[in-house]
């Protein structure tokens, strides 16, 4: 049913339609509206058969869903930014135990300084935690991917993060085809846990493992992630067949056929970039766009195939590996192995800074002319940076290494 609805509510409705049995939550902006709506639905009786537990912290919230999942309950939580960092120990425990928890991460910058606005630094800090990470480009996709996430998680017995841009999506009101219960029931089967704690058949989950077995445990976790490269697109295809729209999957291509320059990005900037690509194409510039939906596992082979024929790729990312540069760029570089395609990385939108079409088109112009540096910080105020560097280091030691805009 088409509704004009806030992104957070659309996600809450999709989660509720997935029939979670336990929700453990602690509020932190910008995910609070999601769990508030789920709390209201449980209290009002709209969401039946679900226990909603207000926890005292994010660490407790993840610990709670770990316990619930381990005894066979379909379990869900949500967080953002410092909240995700607070639960990190338990985040690793969830994947190490192979528990199919679904968690929304309403992406928000990590402090200090404190910043409540959007970038991808929070989820990307957990890229090696063993969780599948799916990035939504719109509120429709965010809602759809939560239902898919439960199916993927439970088939593989692996936890899944659905990442949606904080405020940009969570607090945006737009038209969404809100998922209805009967349709979700037809798509998502009842939860049948692969492993569970049962007093009548006692086993240990997540217990002590010595050097003689730890490598094998990690190898099996790695293999489940590789298996997800087949499961994620299959589940997306099943969703498209039932609901009549493409959502999720590994990658999303836009006007890449014959493109000499391909932009690679994640999240809501995909929509802005579609407008930029259309404008550039109208001006006769051969550019295309590739959206990464599955950041973990990263679709190396699919990315390699998608950029064939291009001369260059430009990776735009809303996170920074301090001292190294791009994060997604590292995976793209691996995907380009064996090609002669040049790669440039653009760090953009940190801490919620707007990524404008004007700046993107100017940047693309430089990329097409092969004038773009290997690492660029979009719209960086070089005057502020230069003054601070010179204040700290009066000797002109940074003259040749000042960042490019």
Image: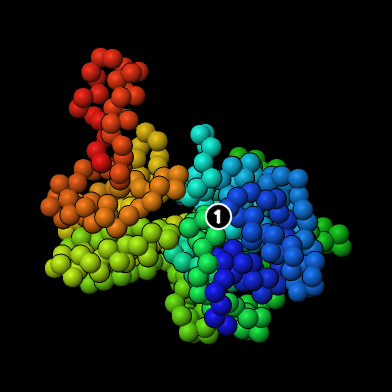
At x 28% / y 31%, what residue is drawn?
383
| Spot occupied by residue 392 in the image (x, y as percentages of width and height) | 35, 18
Answer left or right for 333 relative to 292.
left
Q: How many numbered badges does the structure rendering display?
A: 1
Residue closer to the observer: 89 or 86? 86
Q: Is residue 299 above or below residue 56?
A: below
Answer left or right for 128 relative to 82.
left
Q: Is residue 143 above or below residue 222?
A: below
| Spot occupied by residue 62 in the image (x, y as percentages of width and height) | 69, 50
Q: Quadrant of the C terminus?
A: top left
Residue closer to the observer: 385 or 107? 385
| Spot occupied by residue 369 in the image (x, y as percentages of width and height) | 12, 52
At x 63% / y 41%, what residue is drawn?
86
Tag 1 residue = 106
| Spot occupied by residue 125 in the image (x, y as percentages of width and height) | 50, 44
At x 25% / y 61%, what residue is drawn?
262
Residue closer to the observer: 281 or 163? 281
Residue closer to the observer: 144 or 282? 282
């Amino acid at each position: 049913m088409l509704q004009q609805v806030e992104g957070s509510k659309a996600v809450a409705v999709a989660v509720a339609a997935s029939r979670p049995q336990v929700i453990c939550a602690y509020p932190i902006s910008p995910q609070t509206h999601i769990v508030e709506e789920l709390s209201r639905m449980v209290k009002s009786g709209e969401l039946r058969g679900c226990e909603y537990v207000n926890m005292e912290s994010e660490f407790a919230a993840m610990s709670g869903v770990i316990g619930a999942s381990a005894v066979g309950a379909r379990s869900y939580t949500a967080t953002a930014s410092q909240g995700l960092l607070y639960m990190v120990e338990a985040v690793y425990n969830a994947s190490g135990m192979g528990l199919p928890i679904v968690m929304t991460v309403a992406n928000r910058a990590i402090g200090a300084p404190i910043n409540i606005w959007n970038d991808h630094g929070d989820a990307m800090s957990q890229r090696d935690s063993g969780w599948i990470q799916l990035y939504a480009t719109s509120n429709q996709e965010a809602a759809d991917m939560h239902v898919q996430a439960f199916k993927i998680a439970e088939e593989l017995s692996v936890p899944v993060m659905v990442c949606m841009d904080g405020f940009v999506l969570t607090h945006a009101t737009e038209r969404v085809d809100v998922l209805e219960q009967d349709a979700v029931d037809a798509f998502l089967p009842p939860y049948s846990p692969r492993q569970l704690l049962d007093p009548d058949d006692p086993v240990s989950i997540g217990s002590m493992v010595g050097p003689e077995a730890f490598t094998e445990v990690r190898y099996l976790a790695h293999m489940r992630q590789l298996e997800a490269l087949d499961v994620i697109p299959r589940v997306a295809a099943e969703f498209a067949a039932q609901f009549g729209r493409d959502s999720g999957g590994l990658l999303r291509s836009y006007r890449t056929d014959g493109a000499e320059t391909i932009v690679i990005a994640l999240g809501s900037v995909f929509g802005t970039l579609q407008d930029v690509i259309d404008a550039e194409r109208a001006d006769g510039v051969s550019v295309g766009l590739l959206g990464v939906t599955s950041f973990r596992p990263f679709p190396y082979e699919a990315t390699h195939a998608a950029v064939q024929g291009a001369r260059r790729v430009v990776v735009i990312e809303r996170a920074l590996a301090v001292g190294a540069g791009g994060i997604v760029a590292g995976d793209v570089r691996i995907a380009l192995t064996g090609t002669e395609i040049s790669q440039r990385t653009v760090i953009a939108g940190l801490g919620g800074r707007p990524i404008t079409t004007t700046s993107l088109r100017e940047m693309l112009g430089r990329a097409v002319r092969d004038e773009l540096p290997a690492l660029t910080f979009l719209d960086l105020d070089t005057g502020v940076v230069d003054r601070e560097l010179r204040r700290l280091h009066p000797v002109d030691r940074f003259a040749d290494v000042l960042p490019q805009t």
